[in-house]
Amino acid sequence: MRLAVAALVLVFAGGCYCGARIIQTSSTSTTGAGAPPVIHDIIALLRDPETGKVGRVVVSSPLGGAVELTKKREATRVVVGQPPHSPFMFEQDQIEQLFADALAALPPAPRHFELYFQGGSNQLSQKSEQLLPVIVAFVKNRSVPDVSVIGDTDTTGTPQDNIELGRARAILVRDLLVAAGLDANLISVDSHGEADLLVHTPDNTPEPKNRRVDVSVR
């Protein structure tokens, strides 16, 4: 058999939904003259680089048959015209040796920062202010950065007012990041208001951990 093209699908799964990244690589082997090329995919499940979790992925074929991967470094082979092969395990050194170029080409894992405010104000806490240069340095080390700034509130006030308050906090943090050296065009701003509570509370309950801005750098 001549293996003309091999594709590694690195599946980083942090839950039931699995995102896949496909990198093409080439290799050849022969068992006889004139054998046609065979398209060969390897689908491997790896730990999510952002959360550290291992989820699941189901690989199925129009010909019938399906394989479920649930363990870190568990893999299956998919060949055109055949159902998925039975799962097998990669060792970590095999992943690193066989697919070093593919792994090196993957973008680094995103990073999340939570910025909090001093009680009763829109002034960042001292600890959160100290994170600003850390965020700027992290963004500048990425080749194609994408920065998302999302404002969150506690449950005091009306939901609509909290949407506006969360947006105002996000804009404040964006402006601080721009003043610290980031390009404003890299930063998107949004607000979840009181819809994404870190600490679940009843309505009209002040909670400092819910008054925050989430900064995600991808």
Image (cartoon, helix red, strand yellow):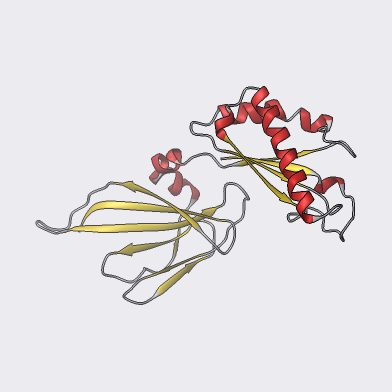
Q: Determine the residue positioned at 29% across, 58% down.
A: 40
Quarter holding the C terminus is top right
Instruction: Report the residue that reaches farthest toward the left.
Output: 34
As drawn, 72 above or below 147: below
Q: Determine the residue positioned at 41% across, 73% down.
A: 66
Instruction: Residue 213: name its quadrant.
Output: top right
Q: Which of 91 and 116 is in front in this view?
A: 116
Q: Position of residue 19 (x, y in %)?
A: 49, 56
Horizontally, residue 2 falls left or right of residue 133, namely left
Q: Nearer the viewer, residue 125 or 25?
A: 125
Q: How many marks overall?
A: 0
Instruction: Report the residue that reaches farthest toward the bottom.
Output: 64
Residue 114 visible in the current orientation: no
Horizontally, residue 176 falls left or right of residue 137, namely right
As drawn, 134 above or below 149: above
Q: Position of residue 177 (x, y in %)?
A: 67, 28
Residue 104 visible in the current orientation: yes
Instruction: Residue 181: name its quadrant.
Output: top right
Q: Where is residue 110 in the image (x, y as percent from the top left)?
A: 58, 42
Quarter holding the N terminus is bottom left
As drawn, 179 above or below 48: above
